Image (cartoon, rainbow, N blue to C red):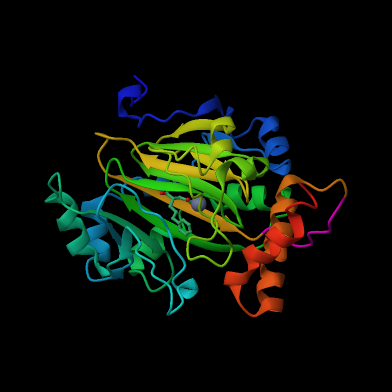
Amino acid sequence: MAGWNESQLRKYNIKMEKIPTLQYDDPKVDSLLTNNKPVLIKGSKLVSRVLKWDLDYLTEHMNSTCCNVLISKNHKFKYYDQKKITPNMTFKPISRPSPMIFSEFAKQIKDWKKGDSRLYMQQVLNNSISQRIVNDFVKFNWDWIISKQNVCKWGSLTSNLLLIAQEGNVTPCHYDEQQNMFASIRGYKRFILFPPSEFECLYPHPVHHPYDRQSQVEFDNPDYIKFPKFKEARGYEVIVGPEDVLYIPMYWFHHVESLMHGGYTVSINFWFKAESVEKIEYPLLDHHKIVIMRNVEKMLAEALHDPSEVGTMLKTIVLGRYT
Ligand SMILES: O=C(O)C(=O)C[C@H](CCCc1ccccc1)C(=O)O
Ligand SMILES: [Zn+2]
């Protein structure tokens, strides 16, 4: 029994291949990591000593901690950057922050009824969390993950996000600018990943939009008129279960869902800065091209002193000349 079945997955019309699953001591793991290729790693025991982190345990030890909780009218939790919301912008996000103390969050999860707004706790773990949580934190298999950080010459560990989602919650397709080792503590999460080269098929929002880095395409109801190339998107799928670790290469797009009818999920990610010395080598890698495109959008907004003029100028440069 795999612990899950296909009926728990949301249905999308996307071509998907499998992501390789390897034991942590398989030498192929390091070659995939160092080549920025996703891999599901089994047996690392990265978080094996905190498998007790369930709602009751965390309520007992994080009881009065105020946590970052998102609330959504539907099952989607599309992250947005508050700093990019300008006064003259009408921005109506579906999910919004609703900070609450942990025990309140746990209670709302337990009492949740169909039709209620959904909740998703996404809390950066730092030393302001209770002493017991800090004591557990040191029990992660740091030797292993630090050995991966060194093999891959990643920069410093920047943060760990503790994620507690209700069954069926979705984090829509987006990319992050850091290397990510994602560990499941409880429950099953389905990931759909796309390499940075699929940028043209996923239509991320403009860099200056609050939804920067997030795909504009609604996977469960794609607008093929506005986003015709989405039909050609080729993804990779994997189910991450308890104690599994998924390597999500930086700039790889990923859609994440907590399986339906699987109960709440508890996960923790490990975000690392990119290579400490990222010397650009040619030919460029696909993720370098995303960095270049981002820099062009930023530089134009800077030069024009108005992000809303960037699209017009890009069209002037390209239409009729490069098309
Ligand atoms: O670990 C990752 O990168 C994920 O995407 C995991 C995802 C939650 C991430 C929320 C988020 C997205 C963008 C910016 C900041 C926070 C999930 O597990 O639902
Ligand atoms: Zn992410």
At x 37%, y 54%, the residue is: 163
For the stretch drawn in magenta, the main secondary structure is loop
Q: Quadrant of residue 80?
A: bottom left
On the image, the x and y values in percent for residue 184 come to: 42, 43
Image position of 159 with respect to 30: above or below: below
At x 51%, y 53%, the residue is: 214
Is 16 on the left or on the right of 48, as rendered? Answer: right
Q: Quadrant of residue 221?
A: top left
At x 62%, y 71%, the residue is: 309
Seen as rendered, the residue at the extreme front is 320
Quadrant in the picture for the N terminus: top left
Part of the protein shown in magenta: 274-281
Image position of 287 with respect to 130: above or below: above
Is 301 on the left or on the right of 61, as rendered? Answer: right
Is 193 on the left or on the right of 7, as rendered? Answer: right
Is 188 on the left or on the right of 35, as rendered? Answer: left
On the image, the x and y values in percent for residue 130 come to: 33, 69
Nearer-the-camera pick, 245 or 131: 245
